Image: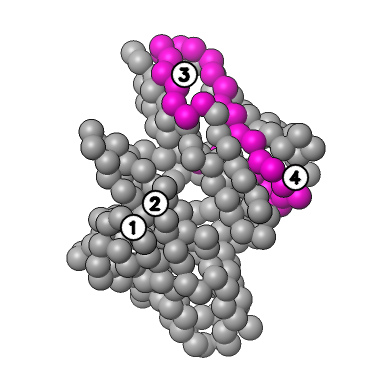
Amino acid sequence: GAVVSQHPSWVICKSGTSVKIECRSLDFQATTMFWYRQFPKQSLMLMATSNEGSKATYEQGVEKDKFLINHASLTLSTLTVTSAHPEDSSFYICSADSSLAGGIYEQYFGPGTRLTVT
Amino acid sequence: KQEVTQIPAALSVPEGENLVLNCSFTDSAIYNLQWFRQDPGKGLTSLLLIQSSQREQTSGRLNASLDKSSGRSTLYIAASQPGDSATYLCAVVTDDMRFGAGTRLTVKP
Protein backbone atom coordinates (compact mmCIF):
# COMPACT_ATOMS: atom_id res chain seq x y z
CA GLY A 1 0.00 0.00 0.00
CA ALA A 2 0.87 3.66 -0.19
CA VAL A 3 3.38 4.98 2.34
CA VAL A 4 3.57 8.33 4.05
CA SER A 5 6.69 9.24 5.99
CA GLN A 6 7.30 11.91 8.57
CA HIS A 7 10.56 13.39 9.69
CA PRO A 8 11.62 13.66 12.40
CA SER A 9 9.80 11.00 14.40
CA TRP A 10 10.53 12.89 17.59
CA VAL A 11 12.13 16.19 18.43
CA ILE A 12 13.00 18.10 21.57
CA CYS A 13 13.54 21.83 21.24
CA LYS A 14 13.94 24.83 23.47
CA SER A 15 11.20 27.35 23.98
CA GLY A 16 11.34 30.13 21.39
CA THR A 17 12.89 28.10 18.63
CA SER A 18 11.18 26.89 15.45
CA VAL A 19 10.74 23.29 14.40
CA LYS A 20 9.99 21.96 10.92
CA ILE A 21 8.21 18.66 10.39
CA GLU A 22 8.18 17.05 6.96
CA CYS A 23 5.46 14.84 5.54
CA ARG A 24 6.17 12.91 2.36
CA SER A 25 4.09 10.59 0.22
CA LEU A 26 6.65 8.08 -0.96
CA ASP A 27 4.99 6.30 -3.84
CA PHE A 28 2.04 8.41 -4.85
CA GLN A 29 1.15 12.01 -5.51
CA ALA A 30 -1.02 13.74 -2.98
CA THR A 31 -2.87 16.87 -3.99
CA THR A 32 -4.19 17.20 -0.47
CA MET A 33 -2.42 16.61 2.82
CA PHE A 34 -3.81 17.03 6.31
CA TRP A 35 -2.10 17.97 9.55
CA TYR A 36 -3.40 16.78 12.90
CA ARG A 37 -2.41 17.30 16.51
CA GLN A 38 -3.09 15.18 19.53
CA PHE A 39 -2.58 16.20 23.12
CA PRO A 40 -2.30 13.52 25.80
CA LYS A 41 -5.62 11.87 26.61
CA GLN A 42 -7.39 13.91 23.95
CA SER A 43 -8.66 13.05 20.53
CA LEU A 44 -6.77 13.69 17.34
CA MET A 45 -7.78 17.08 16.00
CA LEU A 46 -7.47 18.43 12.48
CA MET A 47 -5.27 21.51 12.31
CA ALA A 48 -5.24 22.34 8.63
CA THR A 49 -5.79 21.11 5.12
CA SER A 50 -2.93 21.62 2.73
CA ASN A 51 -3.34 21.69 -1.04
CA GLU A 52 -0.39 21.66 -3.38
CA GLY A 53 0.42 25.10 -4.70
CA SER A 54 -2.09 27.00 -2.60
CA LYS A 55 -2.44 28.34 0.91
CA ALA A 56 -3.45 25.95 3.63
CA THR A 57 -6.91 26.08 5.15
CA TYR A 58 -6.74 26.22 8.92
CA GLU A 59 -9.34 24.97 11.36
CA GLN A 60 -10.88 27.39 13.78
CA GLY A 61 -8.61 28.14 16.70
CA VAL A 62 -5.39 27.18 14.93
CA GLU A 63 -2.97 30.10 14.51
CA LYS A 64 -1.78 30.17 10.92
CA ASP A 65 1.15 32.44 11.75
CA LYS A 66 2.35 30.01 14.37
CA PHE A 67 1.86 26.82 12.42
CA LEU A 68 3.23 27.50 8.96
CA ILE A 69 2.29 24.94 6.35
CA ASN A 70 3.95 24.72 2.96
CA HIS A 71 2.80 22.18 0.37
CA ALA A 72 5.52 22.81 -2.18
CA SER A 73 5.08 19.67 -4.27
CA LEU A 74 2.70 16.77 -4.76
CA THR A 75 4.82 14.63 -2.45
CA LEU A 76 5.90 17.01 0.30
CA SER A 77 4.18 19.16 2.88
CA THR A 78 5.93 20.80 5.81
CA LEU A 79 4.62 22.08 9.12
CA THR A 80 6.78 24.63 10.92
CA VAL A 81 6.01 25.38 14.53
CA THR A 82 7.35 28.89 15.02
CA SER A 83 8.49 30.27 18.35
CA ALA A 84 7.56 27.02 20.04
CA HIS A 85 6.32 27.02 23.62
CA PRO A 86 5.86 24.14 26.05
CA GLU A 87 2.11 24.13 25.35
CA ASP A 88 2.92 23.23 21.73
CA SER A 89 4.30 19.91 22.93
CA SER A 90 2.14 17.36 21.22
CA PHE A 91 1.95 14.50 18.77
CA TYR A 92 1.69 15.78 15.20
CA ILE A 93 0.53 13.49 12.46
CA CYS A 94 0.01 14.08 8.76
CA SER A 95 -2.02 12.24 6.18
CA ALA A 96 -2.14 12.34 2.41
CA ASP A 97 -5.03 11.84 0.03
CA SER A 98 -4.60 9.51 -2.90
CA SER A 99 -7.46 9.83 -5.34
CA LEU A 100 -8.34 6.62 -7.08
CA ALA A 101 -10.50 5.88 -10.07
CA GLY A 102 -14.20 6.40 -9.64
CA GLY A 103 -13.86 9.37 -7.29
CA ILE A 104 -12.73 7.23 -4.38
CA TYR A 105 -10.20 8.69 -2.00
CA GLU A 106 -7.83 6.78 0.20
CA GLN A 107 -6.16 8.59 3.03
CA TYR A 108 -2.79 7.39 4.28
CA PHE A 109 -1.25 8.39 7.58
CA GLY A 110 2.30 9.15 8.55
CA PRO A 111 3.79 7.62 11.70
CA GLY A 112 3.64 10.92 13.57
CA THR A 113 6.13 13.30 15.15
CA ARG A 114 6.32 13.75 18.89
CA LEU A 115 7.36 17.30 19.73
CA THR A 116 8.56 18.23 23.20
CA VAL A 117 9.30 21.87 23.92
CA THR A 118 11.35 22.50 27.03
CA LYS B 1 4.29 -3.73 16.76
CA GLN B 2 0.65 -2.76 17.07
CA GLU B 3 -1.58 -3.94 14.25
CA VAL B 4 -5.10 -2.66 13.80
CA THR B 5 -7.67 -4.48 11.70
CA GLN B 6 -11.14 -3.33 10.72
CA ILE B 7 -13.90 -5.60 9.53
CA PRO B 8 -15.75 -5.39 7.23
CA ALA B 9 -13.82 -3.36 4.67
CA ALA B 10 -17.07 -2.20 3.10
CA LEU B 11 -20.69 -2.31 4.14
CA SER B 12 -23.88 -1.31 2.36
CA VAL B 13 -27.17 -1.15 4.27
CA PRO B 14 -30.64 0.29 3.73
CA GLU B 15 -31.60 3.39 5.63
CA GLY B 16 -32.85 2.79 9.16
CA GLU B 17 -30.78 -0.29 9.92
CA ASN B 18 -28.66 -0.61 13.01
CA LEU B 19 -25.11 -1.66 12.26
CA VAL B 20 -21.85 -2.60 13.93
CA LEU B 21 -18.33 -1.87 12.78
CA ASN B 22 -15.47 -3.86 14.24
CA CYS B 23 -11.91 -2.95 15.13
CA SER B 24 -9.31 -5.31 16.57
CA PHE B 25 -5.79 -4.64 17.78
CA THR B 26 -2.91 -6.88 18.75
CA ASP B 27 -1.33 -5.03 21.69
CA SER B 28 -3.73 -4.49 24.56
CA ALA B 29 -1.44 -1.99 26.33
CA ILE B 30 -3.14 1.03 24.84
CA TYR B 31 -3.69 4.55 26.11
CA ASN B 32 -6.89 5.11 24.21
CA LEU B 33 -8.86 4.18 21.11
CA GLN B 34 -10.58 6.59 18.79
CA TRP B 35 -13.19 6.31 16.09
CA PHE B 36 -13.14 8.75 13.20
CA ARG B 37 -15.27 9.52 10.21
CA GLN B 38 -13.67 10.34 6.89
CA ASP B 39 -15.50 11.94 3.99
CA PRO B 40 -13.95 11.99 0.51
CA GLY B 41 -11.31 14.68 0.18
CA LYS B 42 -11.81 15.84 3.77
CA GLY B 43 -9.85 15.54 6.99
CA LEU B 44 -10.87 13.18 9.72
CA THR B 45 -13.72 14.01 12.06
CA SER B 46 -13.36 12.65 15.56
CA LEU B 47 -16.43 10.69 16.65
CA LEU B 48 -15.62 9.02 19.94
CA LEU B 49 -12.59 8.69 22.19
CA ILE B 50 -12.40 5.83 24.69
CA GLN B 51 -9.69 5.98 27.34
CA SER B 52 -8.05 2.71 28.31
CA SER B 53 -9.89 2.73 31.64
CA GLN B 54 -13.30 3.09 29.99
CA ARG B 55 -15.59 0.44 28.53
CA GLU B 56 -17.75 2.54 26.25
CA GLN B 57 -18.63 6.00 25.04
CA THR B 58 -21.85 7.29 23.52
CA SER B 59 -22.64 10.26 21.34
CA GLY B 60 -26.09 10.55 19.83
CA ARG B 61 -26.75 7.53 17.65
CA LEU B 62 -23.19 6.29 18.08
CA ASN B 63 -21.92 3.95 20.74
CA ALA B 64 -18.38 2.65 20.92
CA SER B 65 -17.24 -0.13 23.21
CA LEU B 66 -13.77 -1.22 24.21
CA ASP B 67 -12.59 -4.61 25.45
CA LYS B 68 -8.88 -4.23 26.00
CA SER B 69 -8.27 -7.77 27.14
CA SER B 70 -9.59 -9.21 23.89
CA GLY B 71 -8.21 -6.38 21.75
CA ARG B 72 -11.56 -5.37 20.33
CA SER B 73 -13.69 -2.31 19.85
CA THR B 74 -17.03 -1.93 18.16
CA LEU B 75 -18.80 1.12 16.81
CA TYR B 76 -22.57 0.78 16.87
CA ILE B 77 -24.62 3.09 14.67
CA ALA B 78 -28.32 3.16 15.38
CA ALA B 79 -31.00 3.99 12.82
CA SER B 80 -28.54 4.63 10.02
CA GLN B 81 -29.11 7.53 7.62
CA PRO B 82 -27.75 8.29 4.13
CA GLY B 83 -25.70 11.07 5.70
CA ASP B 84 -23.80 8.44 7.67
CA SER B 85 -22.21 7.24 4.43
CA ALA B 86 -18.47 7.65 4.87
CA THR B 87 -15.36 5.72 5.76
CA TYR B 88 -15.00 4.96 9.46
CA LEU B 89 -11.55 4.56 10.91
CA CYS B 90 -10.41 3.36 14.28
CA ALA B 91 -7.06 4.34 15.72
CA VAL B 92 -5.20 2.94 18.69
CA VAL B 93 -2.72 4.97 20.70
CA THR B 94 0.20 3.33 22.45
CA ASP B 95 3.54 5.06 21.97
CA ASP B 96 2.30 6.20 18.60
CA MET B 97 -0.96 6.10 16.73
CA ARG B 98 -1.98 3.20 14.51
CA PHE B 99 -4.93 3.33 12.18
CA GLY B 100 -7.04 0.56 10.78
CA ALA B 101 -7.70 0.49 7.04
CA GLY B 102 -11.27 1.64 7.59
CA THR B 103 -14.77 0.46 6.81
CA ARG B 104 -16.48 2.14 3.88
CA LEU B 105 -20.14 2.50 4.79
CA THR B 106 -22.91 3.21 2.30
CA VAL B 107 -26.43 3.83 3.59
CA LYS B 108 -28.99 3.65 0.82
CA PRO B 109 -32.18 5.74 0.96
How packed mark 4 is, by other alpha carbons closer than 10 Å (few <14, some 14-19, many 20 or more), is some
* Disc marking residue B22: none
* Quadrant holding the C terminus of chain B: top left
Q: Is residue B68 in view? A: yes
Q: Nearer the viewer, residue A20 or B46?
A: A20
Q: CA distance from mark 2 to mark 1?
A: 6 Å
Magenta highlight range: B8-36
Amino acid type, mark 4 = Ser
Q: Which residue is mark 3?
A: B80
Circle 3 chain: B
Left or right? Give the position of A6 relative to A25. right
Disc 4/disc 2 C-alpha distance (Å): 26 Å
Secondary element type, mark 2 = loop
Residue on which the image places disc 1:
A27
Residue B11 belongs to the span the image colors magenta = yes
Nearer the observer: mark 4 or 1; the answer is 1
**Alpha carbon of mark 3 to alpha carbon of mark 2: how far?**
31 Å
| Contact flag, marks 2 and 1 (Cβ < 8 Å) | yes
Q: Residue at x 49, y 87 (%)?
A: A17
